Image (spheres, rainbow, N blue to C red):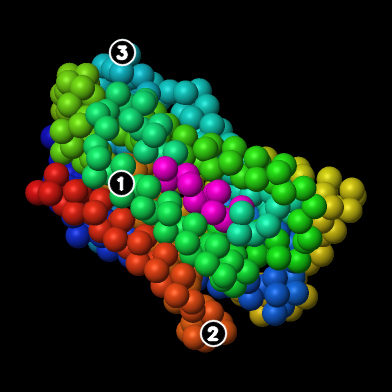
Amino acid sequence: MPLRNDTVAAPHLGGRTAVVLFAFILIAFVTESQLTQYVQTTLAYRQPFFIFYVVHSSFFIIFPLHLLYLTTTTKYSASSLIKGLSIAITDHLSPLETSGLSEFPFFKFSRLVIVLTVGVTYPGLLWFAAISLASVSDVTAIWNTNAFFAYLISVKMFGLKWEPRRLVAVCLATLGVIVVVYGGNAAENSESMPEGSSMSSSARFIKPSAPLVGNVLTLIASFGYGLYQVLYKIYAALPSDPEIISDRQYEQIIDGESEHLQSNLTSANAISAEDTVYPPPFGLHPNLLTSAIGFCTFAMLWIPIPILHYTGVEIFRYPANLTTVFAISGIAFSGVVFNAGFMVLLGVWGPIITSVGNLLTIVLVVFSDVIFGSGTDSLTVWSLLGSGVIVAAFGVLAYDMFTRGS
């Protein structure tokens, strides 16, 4: 009989595993921000696109590491885990063709990975273009409106009802970001950049030249990143994710997926001659997608490097010493933790809560500057007030999440 995955299945909303993971990605983001600033200022290695390429290519390691962890800490073999994951992906991408023995949809999966790679990459690249044209404060504030866009798009695309509590929380979070950025401390907090956009720290060395163009580019990037989060939830996350199951707002989606979920279980049980872990363990599917994005980045995004070099936009040079190499490795590792965890939480908590929760990184960067940067001189009344508003907004959404998931 196939193995059933009862001990490592995805937790309910607000589960301990998801909360611990959320704490790790917040710490990882602050680590990535501080190391990026250290590399591009103290070590004077200003190769933003190359660092971006290294960080995103490093995403590839997360799935093999997760697979290794599961095979060494559970009774499951790598083959049984991969078989169960293959069934879940096949049932998700080709539900009408589900028979328990369907071929893996390589074309659909490859297309999904390419779209996800573009969705993760282009906001960061637009951020880099915008930061050279507009002020850091403008770009940072506009970028972080992606939480607001994620909510608006979620309501429209999922056909959800407007919830005053959620709307107020998202608006408060956006207001809190604006207060932090424009509260007289924008320059010190320029590390508050989009996930994976390790090129942002170099922006302070470039004089803004076209604010309107830069702001428009940032607005497009922010909207695109909010759209990416929602589309990930619709097309990439598995239909068995706990947010859809436990949120009453998604009743119309649950009705449409109920037969599909039952079909998934039937497909797994049909393979009685093979050991199969089904449904996949918590986080294994999004980590596979993250690794696939890393491979796609490694295979495709090296092409701009020689172009940037020969055009003089970014003259390539190797790191000058081992300190720089180790620091870049630290950026890559923390970037892997942040992005992999973010992808998992998009499936567990959904785009609204995850995007607002991501704004807490701004709060942590503010206080990390106190510890590792300029001390209490970096604190202002505005930064404290804005941070408090962001925390309060996330607290409202977290309370809503826990009450729905209980």
Q: Which residue is mark 3?
A: 96
Q: Looking at the picture, which amino acid does disc 1 mark? A: Val
The stretch drawn in magenta includes residue 105: no
Label 2, label 1: how many angstroms apart (C-alpha)?
32 Å
Residue under the image location 19 percent in, 60 percent down: 16
Q: Which residue is mark 1?
A: 168
The stretch drawn in magenta includes residue 142: yes
Answer yes or no: do the residues labelled 2 and 1 have beta carbons within 8 Å?
A: no
Label 2, label 3: how many angstroms apart (C-alpha)?
61 Å
Q: Is residue 234 above or below residue 320?
A: above
Residue 29 in view? no
Q: Looking at the picture, which amino acid does disc 3 mark? A: Leu
Label of residue 377 in the image: 2
Which quadrant is home to the N terminus? top left
Residue 331 at x, y percent in the picture = 57, 66
Is 164 positioned to the left or the right of 289 in the image? left
Q: Is residue 230 above or below residue 331?
A: above
Which numbered disc, 2 or 3, marks the residue closer to the eye?
A: 2
Residue 393 at x, y percent in the picture = 31, 56
Look at the numbered disc 1 and give the secondary structure of its residue: helix
Question: Could you say which is closer to the camera, residue 357 or residue 301?
Answer: 357
Residue 175, image quadrant: bottom left
Look at the numbered disc 3 and give the secondary structure of its residue: helix
Rate crowding at label 3 as few (under 14), some (14 to 19) or many (20 or more) other CA atoms within 10 Å: few
Residue under the image location 84 percent in, 45 percent down: 307
Answer yes or no: do the residues labelled 1 and 3 have beta carbons within 8 Å?
A: no
Question: Could you say which is closer to the camera, residue 75 or residue 61?
Answer: 61
Please provide the residue range marked out in magenta: 139-148
Look at the numbered disc 2 and give the secondary structure of its residue: helix
Q: Earlier in the sequence, mark 2 or mark 3?
A: 3
Q: Looking at the picture, which amino acid does disc 2 mark? A: Asp
Q: Earlier in the sequence, mark 1 or mark 3?
A: 3
